[in-house]
Image (cartoon, rainbow, N blue to C red):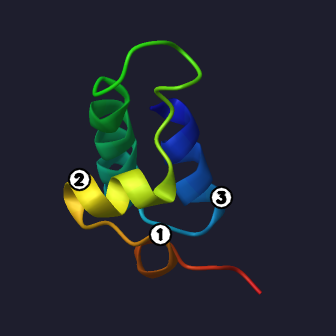
Amino acid sequence: MVGAAAFALARGASVVDAVRLGNAAGAATVTRMGARPSLPTPADLKRLFGIELDEFVKVKT
């Protein structure tokens, strides 16, 4: 998902990590029917792929 990759890049992640997050979010999206209900939450990414957003992207201060 482009939005997840953009989020990661805006938070200072590398391009490789941003693409990994985008791919994981896209994969999580196809696990549910419908446009809005299928958008993954941070909990979905943790459950499906073990991705913790706090550890995955650097927060700019």
Contact, CB < 8 Å: mark 1 with mark 2? no
Q: Nearer the viewer, mark 1 or mark 2?
A: 2
The x, y position of residue 19, in whole percent, is 35, 46
How many numbered marks are there? 3
The x, y position of residue 50, in whole percent, is 24, 67
Q: Amino acid at mark 1?
A: Leu
Pick the residue in front: 35 or 57: 35
| Neighbours of disc 2 within 10 Å: few (<14), some (14-19), many (20+) | few
Q: Nearer the viewer, mark 2 or mark 3?
A: 2
Q: Amino acid at mark 3?
A: Ala
The x, y position of residue 14, in whole percent, is 42, 64
> Label 1 to label 2, Cα distance in Å?
13 Å
Can residue 8 be seen at all in this image of the molecule? yes
Sequence-first disc among 1 and 3: 3
Q: Which residue is mark 3?
A: 10
- Give the image quarter of residue 56: bottom left
The answer to whether residue 11 is above or below residue 39 is below
- Give the image quarter of residue 36: top right
> Label 1 to label 3, Cα distance in Å?
13 Å
Q: Residue furthest top?
A: 34
The answer to whether residue 38 is above or below residue 57 is above
Sequence-first disc among 2 and 3: 3
Disc number at residue 53? 1
The answer to whether residue 24 is above or below residue 29 is below
Q: Amino acid at mark 2?
A: Leu
The answer to whether residue 19 is above or below residue 12 is above
Which type of secondary structure does the marked residue at label 1 adopt?
A: helix
Q: Which residue is mark 2?
A: 48
**In the image: residue 27, left or right of residue 14:** left
